Amino acid sequence: MQVYEGKAKRMRPLSEREVEVVFKDDATAFNGQKHEIFPGKGALNSNISELLFNYLEGKGFPTQHLRRVDERTLIVKRAAMFPLEVVVRFQVAGSLQKRTGLADGTVCDPPIVELYYKRDDLGDPIINDDHIRLLKLATPGEVVELRKLALQIASELRGLFSKARIELFDMKFEFGKTPDGKLILADEISPDTCRFRDMDGAGMLDKDRFRQGKGDLLEGYREVHARLMRILKAS
Ligand code: TMP
């Protein structure tokens, strides 16, 4: 069967129901213009993502995750993916900072939900509900549900990470639909897809280290993983 090569993962359908996902060691930014290999990143991200998906399942949110094969390979449920990135922001950073001129760290109260069209050739542009309707990327009812789910999951994660002394500024989710029409959380949740800031002054613990060329990328990812393991064990 066909293999889908993404920037950070490789996907191979195994059957009608299952897909194998290999987390690569590649880091990219600015739509692939910046690219580097960090041996061990794939293993770290697959572990962090698995921990978070299991945690969210335990909180009643259906996810794509099924089981682990090896240190950087997971088996997930096959689902029809929405070509959308749903970003939830609790504090200003990144493209929102650029778009608004607000200071990094400004609190978004209530949190902001943004939708991006997942199209590398267009540079993943931000779009609104009317564009989604025009492009038929999801039904209006599905968009309402995606926004609601993303906000609920993000709030759950913000609470979890605060216990690890990590401020979750923002994060990106992707969702899929199972053959029976259920919306499930898909793709990954990792320091590639979230902004993690240390609450005690150690700064960025996520892919912004690579985007901004500041600090050791994997050291940040290892710290997120270690703290997550600690708080999940304690709870
Ligand atoms: P942004 O501030 O660059 O729009 O990013 C918002 C969040 O989404 C941030 O946590 C990083 C994540 N993200 C991805 O997961 N993939 C992407 O391609 C981009 C641009 C951002």
Image (cartoon, rainbow, N blue to C red):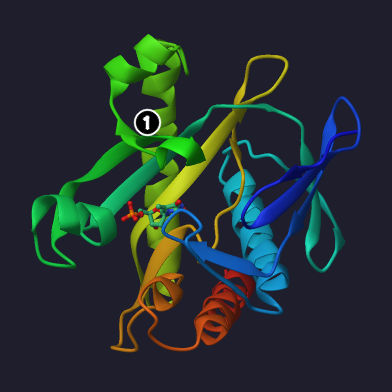
Q: Position of residue 89 (x, y in %)?
A: 29, 51
Question: Residue at image x 84%, y 28%?
Answer: 17
Q: Position of residue 199 (x, y in %)?
A: 31, 80
Q: Is residue 177 left or right of residue 135?
A: right
Find residue 142 and report its horizontal and vertical position in percent.
45, 17
Assess mark 1: CB under 8 A from ligand 1?
Answer: no
Quarter of the image with the C terminus is bottom right
Q: Is residue 20 above or below residue 198?
A: above
Image quadrant containing the N terminus = top right
Question: Ligand 1 is in which quadrant of the figure?
Answer: bottom left
* As drawn, 112 above or below 222: above
Residue highlighted by disc 1 = 147
Q: Is residue 51 left or right of residue 116?
A: right
Where is residue 103 drawn, in percent x and y?
10, 66
Task: Judge from the rendering whether residue 33 lies leftward or rightward of residue 114; answer left or right.
Answer: right
Task: Out of 149 and 7, give the one closest to the viewer.
Answer: 7
Looking at the picture, tell me which residue is in the foreground, 161 or 138: 138
Q: Nearer the viewer, residue 33 or 203?
A: 33
Looking at the rendered structure, the number of numbered marks drawn on it comes to 1
Q: Amino acid at mark 1?
A: Arg
Examine the rendering and report whether any part of residue 118 can be seen: no
Q: Is residue 108 visible?
A: yes
Q: Residue at x 32, y 18 (%)?
A: 131
Q: Residue at x 37, y 44 (%)?
A: 87
Q: Secondary structure at mark 1?
A: helix
The crowding category of the residue bearing disc 1, from other C-alpha atoms within 10 Å (few below 14, some 14 to 19, many at least 20), is some
Vertically, is 1 above or below 22?
above
Query: Which picture quadrant has residue 219?
Result: bottom right
